[in-house]
Amino acid sequence: MLAMGEVGGPHIKAGGAPVEIRGLSKQFGSVRAVDSVSINVAAGEFIALLGPSGSGKSTVLMSIAGFELPNSGQILIGGRDCTRLPPHKRNIGMVFQHYTLFPHLSVLDNVAFPLKMRGIAKDERRRRAARALEVVRLGGYGERMPKQLSGGQQQRVALARAIVYEPQLLLMDEPLSALDKNLREEMQLEIKRLHSELGITIIFVTHDQSEALTMADRVAILQSGRVAQISGARDLYERPTSLFAAGFIGEMNMIEASWNGTEVTFAKNFSMALPSSAVIDDVAAGPVMLTVRPERVEVMPEGTPGTASARVDDVVYAGAGTLVIASMACGGTIRARKGSADLSAIREGDRVGIRFPADAVLIYPRQA
């Protein structure tokens, strides 16, 4: 048992189940929504599924939940083959984008509803529901109706309902997208706290990149029904393994360039040597795509040795940070993000020098 707060406080059983997805495929007519996806999730791990619309992330989640039957592959939860088990036999919790609370039931009865469906006696289910509300910090709200709660509170009720029967796996389908920015950030912290304290395995679908990087132990990027990359947040951001992943996660400058095996050339008569670590996926000599994060771009006076010439098109002030958008003399647009104090003297129309630290550059094969 895992205690929260002071002695005598609410208790929810700790522990999560490992999940194995083996060669999962799902087809809708002529569309192959999921194509041979394999992911291993450790017990107690928090995995985020991230990708553009139509990438297959929600179909994978619905297959794990039992709401979609795959055409091929296996889903093992806690070592048990659940591929064709109905949802109610998988012992999983589910939180949807919309709270799906019963408007005619009190908060306590909403949370207790899954226990009622499992035949738990009334007194016991009310006791366990009250305990789950304490876990999500809504103790004392049990007699209220859903319409009396804020959006964030309603989502907490949905979380309480999902954990009240102590599942080992919690599936979440874009649960925070309906909340405003402040509530969303508050709920991100709340879910991370619950994950840490309960030790439950979580698989979380989101379209929000920062949400995935902030919350998850690992992030799986899906592209056209396949896993493009799965790794921790730092590796995903700092060393994406494909040009798709590089362009999908965060902001990324992409410049057409040429690579000779030692140096990359991206402006007339302007080359820079790169360490071997900059080469992704065994790039052959020839056309490449040079990539660099905006926060690593250096903006300097024009003519500074080692810089490429550019003209400032726009300066976007955003409080602590400022975005500089510039057109390079060699062609293409570059974005630089720095602290506002560092770029306070730069104005639209200025001529500047642009420099990339060699350790900030990654190059990929240029896509056709």
Image (spheres, rainbow, N blue to C red):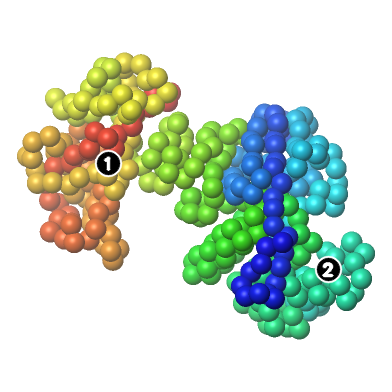
- Front position among marks 1 and 2: 2
Q: Position of residue 130 (x, y in %)?
A: 75, 75
Say if residue 180 shows up in the picture: no
Q: CA distance from mark 1 to mark 2?
A: 55 Å
Vertical comparison of 303 with 96: above or below: above
Q: Secondary structure at mark 2?
A: helix
Residue that appears at 30% across and 46% down: 294
Q: Secondary structure at mark 1?
A: strand
Q: Tell me, for residue 209, which label it has, or none.
A: none
Residue bearing the label numbered 1 = 333
Give the amino acid type for the residue marked by disc 1 in the picture: Thr
Question: Which image quarter: residue 355?
Answer: top left
Q: Nearer the viewer, residue 71 or 80?
A: 80
Vertical comparison of 329 with 318: above or below: above
Horizontally, is 123 left or right of 145 in the view? right
Q: Which part of the image, by quadrant, shows the N terminus?
A: bottom right
Say if residue 296 shows up in the picture: yes
Q: Position of residue 366 (x, y in %)?
A: 38, 25
Q: Nearer the viewer, residue 5 or 322?
A: 5
Vertical comparison of 86 with 79: above or below: below
Question: Which image quarter: residue 225?
Answer: top right
Residue bearing the label numbered 2 = 113
